[in-house]
Amino acid sequence: MIDTFNRAITYLRVSVTDRCNLRCRYCMPDSGIERRGHSDILRSEEIIEICAAAADLGVTKIRVTGGEPLVRKGIVPLCAELGKLGVELVMTTNGILLAQYADELKQAGVSRVNISLDTLNPERFRELTRGGELSSVLRGIEAAKRAGLSPIKLNAVALRGINDDEFEKFRELTLDGTTEVRFIELMPIGEGKALWDKSFYTLDAETLPERMSVIAPISHAFCPTCNRLRLTADGKLKPCLHSAEEYNIRGLHGNELKNAIINAANSKPKQHAGLTSDNPSESRRGMSRIGG
Ligand code: SAM
Ligand code: SF4
């Protein structure tokens, strides 16, 4: 078990690709991200080896993310291998390809999915994602429910002027009891930095109905209870989402790999400074290259 500041690190978020089939304005630059060579990205065997080492060290939950995880070739067999590690296996996806993959993911051992969806208005969705089709995500949500990838958690970044009038529409999605909606505070990281002053808003968690909540990294930073490490698609461990610090663990094996994971966990900062537009994230990567 990796203990740091009296906290066990039990949760690993694994980005399996930097690529994405959407370009959300708060996450991805208009030009997309610089294309990397195939060899810059961890192979499936490498991801499995790192996750197995982490599981040996006490990690009990792995989240597959990206970029968009479902655009990675071979994502289902990769999940099937991760599913054999005896950890809770979950995924965060934008849902565009989920209708196609939901059943196979469930069979591969993914227990549930978080689906990112910021607006239920097709025009706004197209504008915010630079061309995405809301209907594909809605089909993905239905397929995920049928496949039993539940409870479905919908993550909506709270964006002033984009979805601050959609509370009731999101609430309707929760009424059949299958779906939770979580509003995430916009963070000044990557593309979010430039949008933050104009677009940040939050909701009062105390007043929200059942199955609706707020994830509040800005107004209630959860650093003291953060139990996670992040693995980037190019093989770096990030002890803290908002720090520039990264540890390259690609090419390490056995005890060397495990020691590097422990070192990264031990360098987790106690707390990062409060985030604002004047004091944005120190991460050199935007969210699409970290995995949310
Ligand atoms: N493509 C997948 C998706 O959209 O679910 C997984 C990767 S995406 C980077 C993971 C999460 O990060 C999404 O829920 C997205 O909304 C969130 N995210 C991206 N940029 C953000 C920002 N600046 N502030 C808050 N959340 C952000
Ligand atoms: Fe892609 Fe997810 Fe970033 Fe949107 S939030 S651009 S879907 S990685």
Image: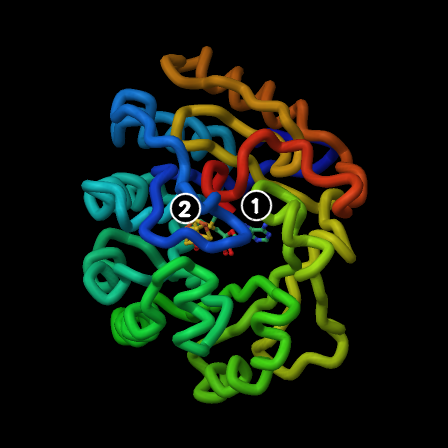
For marks 2 and 1, the one nearer the N-term is 2
Quarter the N terminus occupies: top right
Task: Give the number of the disc on residue 191.
Answer: 1
Q: Residues within 10 Å of mark 2 (few under 14, many from 20)?
A: many
Q: Residue at x 44, y 88 (%)?
A: 176
Residue 71 position within the rendered picture, expressed as x and y whole percent measured from the top left: 27, 47
Residue type (three-letter) at the residue carrying disc 1: Glu
Residue type (three-letter) at the residue carrying disc 2: Thr
Residue 258 position within the rendered picture, expressed as x and y whole percent measured from the top left: 48, 19
Left or right of residue 201, residue 289 in this image: left
Q: Residue at x 67, y 29 (%)?
A: 268
Residue 127 position within the rendered picture, expressed as x and y whole percent measured from the top left: 44, 65
Position above or below: 173 against 11: below
- Mark 2: C-beta under 8 Å from nearest atom of ligand 1: yes
Q: Residues within 10 Å of mark 1 (few under 14, many from 20)?
A: many
- Mark 1: C-beta under 8 Å from nearest atom of ligand 1: yes
Residue nearest the viewer, comparing 259 with 193: 193
Task: Give the number of the disc on residue 80.
Answer: none
Q: Indicate the secondary structure of the residue bearing disc 2.
A: strand
The residue pinned by badge 2 equals 65
Q: Is residue 180 visible?
A: yes
Q: Is residue 16 visible?
A: no
Left or right of residue 6, residue 190 in this image: left
Residue 273 position within the rendered picture, expressed as x and y whole percent measured from the top left: 80, 38
Q: Quadrant of residue 55?
A: top left
